[in-house]
Image (cartoon, rainbow, N blue to C red):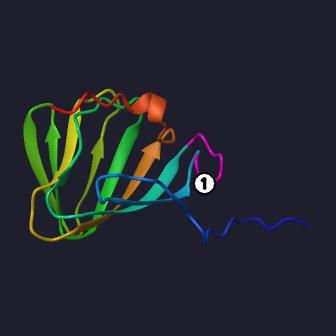
Amino acid sequence: MSKPYTLQSSPFIVPTTDGKLIEEHFGLASTGESHLSIAHMVAPPGWSEPFQTPEFDEYTYVIRGKKQFNIAGEIVILEAGQSIKINKNTRIQYANPFEEACEYLAICIPAFAPGTVHREEAE
């Protein structure tokens, strides 16, 4: 008989070239689930990525440090203990221009997929 739960102890480590740690616990890459993804991330100081306009809602909860969001031209800074929901089809840029690493959880509904994030070319 199968168990009525799934314990995740070996998340998928997403390969990156920018120093950011991405551990997907549930989602397309780790468990094949398409309805949501949950990832633990650590963005190093000075990290940023290009603007994107995802086809999914993204929730972020900051565990430690700070994270900067450029949401359709408005700068929002989250600190430890704060969370935010970014609605799908919103142009956004994520960054950590601060001196401390930022550790956070990201939940995407439906699941994150490279083909649905629509990252712009880096400037």
Looking at the rendered structure, the number of numbered marks drawn on it comes to 1
Secondary structure state at the residue bearing disc 1: loop
Q: Amino acid at mark 1?
A: Ser
Q: Is residue 47 above or below residue 56?
A: below
Magenta-colored stretch includes residue 8: no
Residue 88 horizontal/vertical position (percent): 35, 32
Image quadrant in which you'd find residue 40: bottom left
The residue to which callout 1 is attached is: 30
Magenta-colored stretch includes residue 31: yes
Residue 17 horizontal/vertical position (percent): 34, 52
What residue is at 30 percent from the left and 29 percent from the top?
Answer: 53
Magenta range: 29-35
Residue 97 horizontal/vertical position (percent): 10, 57
Q: Quadrant of the N terminus?
A: bottom right
What residue is at 26 percent from the left and 28 percent from the top?
Answer: 120
> Mostly what secondary structure, the magenta segment?
loop
**Side (left or right) of 91 relative to 106:** left
What residue is at 47 percent from the left and 29 percent from the top?
Answer: 115
What residue is at 35 percent from the left and 50 percent from the top?
Answer: 59
**Side (left or right) of 9 relative to 70:** right
Image quadrant in which you'd find residue 7: bottom right
Residue 16 horizontal/vertical position (percent): 38, 52
**Side (left or right) of 7 relative to 104:** right
